[in-house]
Amino acid sequence: MNNLVKDCLAIVIYSVTFLLGLPSNILVFFVYVRKARKRGATPNVVYALNLCVANLVLVAWIPVKAFEVLLNNWKLPALVCPIFNFFLFSSVYGSCLFITAVTVGRYLSIAFPFIYKMYRRTKISCFFSVALWVIVWVHLSIGLVAEGGANFISVENDIVACYDSFNDTQLDVLLPLRLEMAIGLFILPLIITSFCTLRCVVLVWRSNLRPLGKKRVLTVALSTLAVFVVCYAPYNTSHIVGFILDANVEWRSLAILTSLFNVFLEPAVMLLLSPAGSRGIMGRICGRQSHFSRIKRIPRKSVGKNKAVNVPEKQTEDGEREAIENNQV
């Protein structure tokens, strides 16, 4: 691909990601903070907040990369380059792990609701969140060993680039590390996410939920899996290909662009497809109540009389509401 076309494509993606990702993730953050204050910090809320923080960290550093591409030169101090990449990849792989955590929580809440309720404690969720961040940071810290004091800055034809070209010594450390990260931080979470999502589909499909309730849960679950694959598969594939070829593949810089899509796609799944989002946000946008916010009444025939009495639907839909509320992210 022509360098000019490649740079233009990158600038467009960076701009769209920043413009869509910043407000959507701030909105998600305050929605779930408010939910945590009102109903308590459930595991899915804790993981969703961590996912939101990971996205905001990535959004905050996007202008740095955009200006490098726009100027076709790295103008910042050399020390900023490894710091920038540390936060960039912390966000990418942190998002992978927290999407997996959300999916596992969704599956457990459907498959083992009573056992799951026993362990729905904020402290446990926070502990797992810290553990997931530590796993990511340990992997990235090992990568810093490979820079050898050069801060991953390369100079070619008087053009300074950040984390673009590597010498053989750096690749000897980076290529195996990238492969291990692709397997441990993407392929393994992908297998877990796929299993939990498919099991959710089967369980919800066989459940007594109403058709609209099933559609909500299945749409959120399958959309999350689709976002996971579309956003992170290309970049991690470049790790595997690079290890096989024993080289830093050229299309790796394009593959990383798809990882940015998660910044605005995942909030869309959280807000627009979840019942919480449609109840509150979409209801206000449309200026009317959503389906789930209306109080419905269903007819029930009384004994001995052919008269219909109104019974609050809420009393007959506790199981449905609980299943849907457990699957809001």
Image: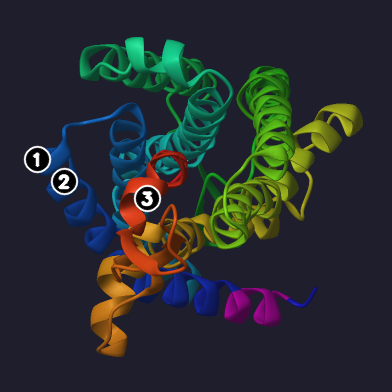
Numbered disc in front, either 2 or 3: 2
Badge 2: few (under 14), some or many (20 or more) residues near its Cα, within 10 Å? Answer: some
Q: Quadrant of residue 285?
A: bottom left
Amino acid found under the numbered disc labelled 1: Arg
Amino acid found under the numbered disc labelled 3: Asn
Give percent across and percent down for residue 148.
Answer: 49, 21
Furthest-left residue in this view = 37
Numbered disc in front, either 1 or 2: 1
**Quadrant of the snapshot with the N terminus:** bottom right
* Disc 3 secondary structure class: helix
Query: Nearer the N terminus, badge 3 or badge 1?
Result: 1
Which residue is identified by label 2? 33
Instruction: Give the left or right position of residue 102, taking residue 30 as reference.
Output: right
Which residue is identified by label 1? 37
* Disc 1 secondary structure class: helix
Say above or below: 157 vs 126.
below
Which residue is painted at 52% across and 55% down in the image? 262
Query: Label for residue 245?
Result: none
Which residue is painted at 59% across and 23% down in the image? 111
Circles 1, 2 touching at the beta carbon (< 8 Å): yes
Give percent across and percent down for residue 203.
Answer: 68, 34
- Camera sees residue 148: no
Give percent across and percent down for residue 294.
Answer: 30, 71
User: Observer-nearest residue: 265 or 290?
Assistant: 290
Amino acid found under the numbered disc labelled 2: Val
Furthest-right residue in this view = 245
Which residue is identified by label 3? 55
Total marks shown come to 3
Q: Which residues are magenta?
A: 3-9
Numbered disc in front, either 3 or 1: 1
What distance separates the C-alpha of mark 1 from that of mark 2?
A: 6 Å
